[in-house]
Image: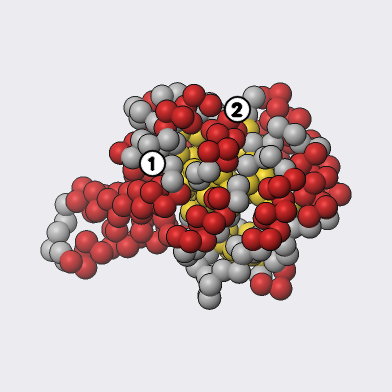
Amino acid sequence: MALVSMGPMLRRARADGFGIAAYNMIDFNSARSIISGASDLAAPVIVQVSVKTVKHWGYAHVATWVRMLAEDAPVPVALHLDHCTDIDVLKRCIDAGWTSVMFDGSALPFAENLEKSSLVYALTESAGVGLEAEIGAIGGVEDDKVVNDDQSRLADYDECLRFVAAMPNLAVFAPAIGTAHGFYKGEAKIAYDLLERITKAIPTPIALHGGTGLTDDQFRRCIALGCGKVNISTMHKRLFIDGFVGLKAEKPKLEEPLPFIAAQHDAMKADVMACIRTFGSAGRAAEASDAA
Ligand code: 13P
């Protein structure tokens, strides 16, 4: 299928109570594992890319890989830019064929974040692509963004209402609710009460950041409360490396590269499939395509 925009399928996911996996791709093999895992389970999926990864490979290459893979897949695939603070990068992605982008103004004071996000919203609305925007401060490390424990901050409820009211067609809203990027030191402390208050007042699908290390119960509870988009990056990176070097440890004499690429692909794909099952999006491709 042609690449789709994530907004309509996320609205369907929220309405029907399932979560769509949003994996941060690393290279072609990684994108292939994400789309192949979703295809085998007839699930909609979001391939998202961090700014560093886009700059490493180049805008046109990343867009071409994902578009080609999506065209061969029987499921809806969206191409999304993760946590971007630079409007020029965001514009280049839109020009290269991304179907949605995230503007991350969460490090700015609320009024400035609202002002900049609204500006980007006008831009994405006129370009016909989806927008994700964040408030509060999600802890941990994502790309070049480091938010220490003492800097992480839950989203303020009243600010959430004002923020989304200014952007009624936001594809997905990312309020900080206690999850963090990277591996958790203990169990994540999710502010379910805040999430519930937000989703009772706001119909926009919510993005659950910091998916690596959450328990199945935590995923299910957040999805039931309105998290339509579930982000996974750190575990995917771990399997990208372990899948490759694990085979070398097992077969030190092996010099042929393709079995390594296959082992890496299969390790990443198995995790994608496990998450899709947990998020309840297996078998939802047709439903999500109708919405898209
Ligand atoms: P993890 O790296 O914790 O899986 O979080 C991913 C994420 O939220 C990307 O924005």
**Mark 1 crowd level (few <14, some 14–19, many ≥20, 10 Å Cα):** many
Which residue type does callout 2 highlight? Asp
Which residue is tagged 2? 95
Which residue is at the far right?
111
Q: Earlier in the sequence, mark 1 or mark 2?
A: 2
**Mark 2 crowd level (few <14, some 14–19, many ≥20, 10 Å Cα):** few
Residue 55 horizontal/vertical position (percent): 54, 44
Nearer to me, 143 or 127:
127
Residue for point 28% across, 63% down: 245
Nearer to me, 112 or 45:
45
Does 273 appear above or below 255? above
The secondary structure type at the circle numbered 1 is loop
Total numbered labels placed on residues in the image: 2
Q: Which mark is residue 282?
A: 1
Q: Is residue 52 left or right of residue 69?
A: right
Residue for point 21% across, 63% down: 248
